[in-house]
Amino acid sequence: MKLLKTISLLLPLTSAAVLPREERVSYDGFKVFRVTTGDSLATVQEKLADFSLQQWNLDTSAHIDVAVSPAQLSNFEALGLNVTVMHEDLGADIKAEFDISAVSGLKPRALPDASWFKNYHPYNDHLLFTKDLAATFPSNSEVITSGTTVQGRTITGIHLWGKSGKGSKPAIVFHGNVHAREWITSMTVEYLTYQLVTGYGNNGSAATAMLDAYDFYILPIVNPDGFVYTQTTNRLWRKNRSPAPSGNRCIGTDINRNWPYQWDIPGGSSTDPCDETYRGKTAGDSPENKGLTSLITTLRDTTGIKLYIDWHSYGQYILTPYGYNCTAEAVNQAEEDQLAAGTAAAIKKVGGTTWTTGPSCSTLYATSGSSTDYVGDVGKAEHSITIELRDTGANGFVLPASQILPSGEEQWAGLKYLIANL
Ligand SMILES: *[C@@H]1O[C@H](CO)[C@@H](O)[C@H](O)[C@H]1NC(C)=O
Ligand SMILES: *[C@@H]1O[C@H](CO)[C@@H](O)[C@H](O)[C@H]1NC(C)=O
Ligand SMILES: *[C@@H]1O[C@H](CO)[C@@H](O)[C@H](O)[C@H]1NC(C)=O
Ligand SMILES: [Zn+2]
């Protein structure tokens, strides 16, 4: 693998380094609890109202997952809520998950071989991984970009094609790590990419069939500013890093509430810049969304988009449109239901995991300005899906590295089913 030539390409990406260093947020001694809600939702919310807790999940119908600081712990426990413990010591689990100080040397180690999937990695190594993978597959791939971030990073990915040549087949598009803390998503998307690249050309392989039928446009980390921030400063950051609007102190827009379609439907996002689902000042105003919509509309207007998957975590869901309206049905709703159910079964067969499927709003919660509604209706993708990866709450966002391979393997099984049945 030729690593050295790519290094100079990576250097301009460090504009974030000139910003003042922020103190790393410590989660030492934090406990993460799953609080049962159900019929007691209102009571539970009332009890939690006095605490300003970091809440991990948006769908509170069955449970609320919250991180509780050491200072809050005794008061929280005195509430007598029905809880299970997700993390006994979140800080310790974050350190065990990924130790950036152990890997923050400048020496490239990101050889594209399967050992990559044993660990989480720094952002620059992800770039190197993608570039190296493209270098090993020069006749069937190239590195692509899809715009620029708030801090000036280039949203980078890979385009793969098969025997008919570059850009000749309908597009399949993957977005990973739009939510910065959902680390398992970029690793899983890279695993799928790795299977496509290494499996292509083997007679009768699924990878050969997939690449000969479709052009893949794969962007493993579409929110690199947020991703880097989770590694340097706050492991649980979700949004991009757009500056606080004037008169406000809170940073960041939720890229997955900023897509310029059904953007301001009440209840599907927040107008408060301090909220995790802040939708931005105007529809599609984040630089990340501008860059991402540009590739989507280009593909729509050329080869068309057969399948779009936006990869998230956690919860183990396969979600189809719509997010903005809980009763509106997609024109191909019955087909989407079947595809999602079949994909879930294929995943379960390999991983033993259980997946919930259905239209996004009615299955999980309302979302406005979401990627799947946009790419489905504006991008005219035939199938537009959100997949919430592992787990269902044992670890949440801080998923041990030992689950990267199992996640990749089960999703590869699901993807093979899905694409064979499109
Ligand atoms: C606590 O939650 C568990 C799991 O959801 C449930 O089985 C149990 O009945 C609940 N107990 C109480 C006292 O609410
Ligand atoms: C590929 O496999 C098929 C069926 O398994 C076989 O008929 C064909 O000859 C093989 N082609 C090559 C080039 O090996
Ligand atoms: C949701 O969709 C239904 C069915 O298409 C429609 O009647 C309703 O007006 C929609 N609601 C909103 C808020 O758009
Ligand atoms: Zn997400």
Image (spheres, rainbow, N blue to C red):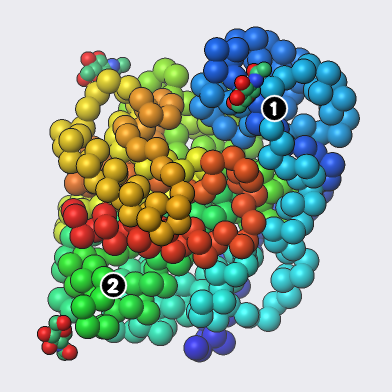
The kind of residue tagged 2 is Ala
Instruction: Give the quarter of the image for residue 249.
Output: top right
Residue type marked 1: Val
Going 74% across and 59% down the picture, which residue do you hit?
Answer: 96
The label number, if any, that marks residue 207 in the structure image: 2
Q: Please give the name of the residue rendered at 62% of the width and 52% of the height, measured from the top-left corner.
A: 399
Residue at 74% of width from left, 52% of height from top?
Answer: 93
Whole-percent x, y for residue 108 in the image = 63, 80
Q: Of the numbered discs in the image, which one, if any, rests on residue 199?
A: none
**How much space separates mark 1 and mark 2, taking CA atoms?**
44 Å
Task: Decide: few, some or many residues near mark 1? Use Cα within 10 Å; few <14, some 14-19, many ≥20.
Answer: some
Q: In terms of secondary structure, where does tag 2 sit? A: helix
Image coords of residue 321 (percent x, y): 29, 35
Taking the image as shown, residue 42 lies to the left or right of residue 51, namely left
- Mark 1 CB near ligand 1 (8 Å cut): no
Residue 80 relative to residue 40: left or right: right
Q: Splitting the image into four quadrants, where does ligand 3 fall?
A: top left
| Residue lying at 62% horizontally and 61% vertically, measured from the top left | 401
Q: Are marks 1 and 2 in contact (CB under 8 Å)?
A: no
Residue 221 visible within the image? no
Q: Which of marks 1 and 2 is nearer the N terminus?
A: 1
Residue 67 against residue 210 in the figure, above or below: above
Residue 249 placement, left or right of 314: right
Q: How crowded is mark 2: few (under 14 residues within 10 Å), some or many (20 or more)?
A: many
Q: Position of residue 24 (x, y in %)?
A: 79, 50
Residue pointed to by mark 1: 83
In the rendered view, would you say 314 is above or below 350?
above
In this rendering, does residue 210 appear at all? yes
